[in-house]
Image (tube, rainbow, N blue to C red):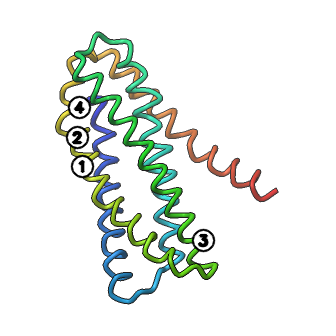
Amino acid sequence: MQVRAPLMIEHRLIERMLALIKAEDMRIRETGDIDSVFIDNAVDFIRVYADKTHHGKEEGILFRDLANKDMSSQEKRIMSELVEEHLVGRKTVSDLVDAKKRHFAGDNSAHEIVVEKLEFLITFYPRHIEKEDKVFFPAMMQYLPVEDQERMLREFWEFDRNVIHQKYRDLVEELA
């Protein structure tokens, strides 16, 4: 299996969640009602699955290893853009959480910010995913011999195995 395969499989699940976020965004526009539980679940999915798990493997394993390769300046630039886009996604999710809290605390101006952040996510992530799937991942394969990919895949599986334990250790600490 190529090292990009699990990342692209994860992209498909992220796209499914984005479709649900889009449907919720449309429902909010029609009814004006923000579903706090849906927002919380979407935020949890993005933070844990898309960011910690998926971006964690990209940044902490794939990009780490690629940084030591003799990539072209264009490929290095794209990798840097991808990291920057991960930061933008994190900031947007934090802003969404803040706006949701403000909305439910009675700040009517926060309603539009919730909608704005949802709309940003449903347009931003598909472009980001397309850049990875169609531009960056194919280009980076030339720098990764089979043995590197096999080692990285083993690291991916170990990384995934540890994420769930970290999530719930953090939860217990937060609640304690």
Q: Amino acid at mark 3?
A: Lys
**Which-is-in-front pick, marks 4 and 1?**
1
Q: From mark 2 to mark 4, how far is it between C-alphas?
A: 6 Å
Q: Nearer the viewer, residue 149 or 90?
A: 90
Q: From mark 1 to mark 3, how far is it between C-alphas?
A: 28 Å
Secondary structure state at the residue bearing disc 2: helix
Count neighbours of disc 2 (C-alpha within 10 A) and say few if under 14, some if 14 to 19, many if 20 or more: some
Q: Are marks 4 and 1 in contact (CB under 8 Å)?
A: no
Q: From mark 1 to mark 2, how far is it between C-alphas?
A: 6 Å
Q: Earlier in the sequence, mark 2 or mark 4?
A: 2
Which residue in the rendered view is the most extreme toward the right? 176
Q: Are marks 1 and 2 in contact (CB under 8 Å)?
A: yes
Q: Looking at the rendering, which quadrant does residue 30 occupy?
A: bottom left
Q: Which residue is mark 4?
A: 136
Labelled disc at residue 101:
3
* Residue name at image x 28 percent, y 17 percent: 144
* Residue name at image x 20 percent, y 18 percent: 142
Q: Amino acid at mark 4?
A: Phe
Q: Is residue 160 left or right of residue 134?
A: right
Q: Which residue is mark 1?
A: 127
Q: Earlier in the sequence, mark 4 or mark 1?
A: 1
Q: Which residue is mark 2?
A: 131
Using the image, determine if residue 112 lies above or below residue 133: below
Q: Name the spot of residue 39 as percent of width and height, x first.
A: 49, 70
Q: Name the spot of residue 124 as percent of width and height, x first.
A: 30, 53
**Which-is-in-front pick, marks 1 and 3?**
3
Q: Are marks 4 and 3 in contact (CB under 8 Å)?
A: no
Count neighbours of disc 1 (C-alpha within 10 A) and say few if under 14, some if 14 to 19, many if 20 or more: few
Q: Amino acid at mark 1?
A: Arg
Q: Are marks 2 and 4 in contact (CB under 8 Å)?
A: yes
